[in-house]
Amino acid sequence: MTITVTQLHRYPVKSMGGHAMDQVSLTAKGIPGDRSWALKDEERGGIKGGKRFPGLLAMQAHFAAEPTEETVSPEVRITLSDGQSVSTSDPDINAILSTQVNAPVSIWPLLPADQLDHYRRPEMEPGTDPEAYFREVFARTPDEPLPDLSVFPEELFIYESSPGTYFDAFPILLMSQASLDYFQAAMREQGESSQFDTRRFRPNILVQTPESGFPENSWVGRRGKLGGAVVKIETVCPRCVMTTHGFDDLPKDPKIMRHLVKENDGNLGVYLSIEQPGPVSIGDSLVWMD
């Protein structure tokens, strides 16, 4: 069985559109520059992305210069939904972004991992029903099960992301084309027009495999050589409300989540950790080591 890398993506700002790459370096902290900036909610607190501010998905981000070990969060040029171009170095960037998302926000580079207050998850507002909160985050109806969050590091219940990063959980998200094709075919069979477009799901790595269905589900726990790196498949990725938001030419579509839940328990793709850093290029293979 050959598993081949067909797409590589990096997202300079959390929840904004990113860009394709022909080659990336995988490090213990993921792809250099990936999610190296993020927005902080100045009203409710915490680092937030598209779940809280859907308008971010319609913005595109590109680096003015490549990240380095010394500058992990270099200047980013942001193209807003109206075509306006701004920069993280602009003195009024926070005001501009606040206007765009209709809430007071500020944009931040990665801070050192010991700056714990920066990454800390704000407490739920008094009177908040935790189950209702998670149903809203994961776009689950009352009759649908919530994802099993016990598989994620406990620190993610204290911090919005692992301190020193802006990832939701693990540094790399990998998806198979087979999973996307399965969902798209299921929608067509039911006469629905929902688009299982890669842009909705924001993978770092897309792979082609001869298996159909959801092949990556069976890879959890395995170790493999991916290009010049060694990776471990940590867990499946439970999807959230972000996948249903409309942006660019993609409409808002709650049916996306209904099909994800029905066909694959709301999951799509798998999270990886990096055991041995190395380069990965389009056309490289994932070769199992166990």
Image (cartoon, rainbow, N blue to C red):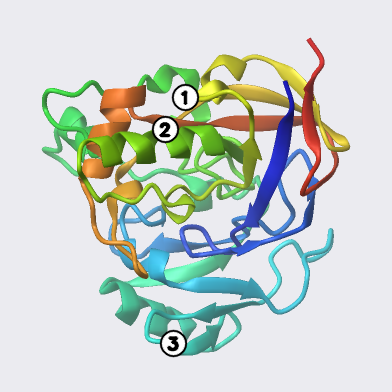
In the figure, residue 90 lies in which quadrant? bottom right
Q: Position of residue 240 (x, y in %)?
A: 34, 40
The answer to whether residue 117 is left or right of residue 272 is left
Q: Which amino acid lies under the numbered mark 2 shown in the image of this protein?
A: Tyr
State the separation of the CA atoms marked 2 and 1.
Answer: 6 Å
Toward the viewer: 19 or 232?
19
The residue pinned by badge 2 equals 182
Q: Residue at x 51, y 72 (%)?
A: 60
Judged from the image, the secondary structure of the residue bearing numbered disc 2 is helix
Name which residue type carries label 1. Gly
Residue under numbered circle 1 = 213
How many numbered markers are drawn?
Answer: 3
Tell me residue 245's x, y (percent). 29, 56
Looking at the picture, tell me which residue is in the foreground, 204 or 51: 204
CA–CA distance in space, label 1 to label 3: 38 Å
What residue is shown at x 43% (from left), y 80% (from top)?
A: 80
The residue that disc 3 covers is 83
Mark 3 nearby-residue class (10 Å; few <14, some 14–19, many ≥20): few
Tell me which label, 2 or 1, sits earlier in the chain: 2
Q: Amino acid at mark 3?
A: Gly
Q: Earlier in the sequence, mark 3 or mark 2?
A: 3
User: How far across and how far down the image is residue 2, in percent?
Assistant: 74, 26
Q: Secondary structure at mark 1?
A: loop
Give how far across and how far down residue 191 sits, in percent: 20, 43
Asked which secondary structure carries label 3, the reply is loop
Instruction: Give the quarter of the figure containing the N terminus.
Output: top right
Q: Which image quarter: residue 287?
A: top right
Quadrant holding the C terminus: top right
Question: Can I make out residue 237 in this image?
Answer: yes
Decide: is 199 above or below 196: below
Q: In this rendered view, identify the residue nearer to me: 258 or 193.
A: 193
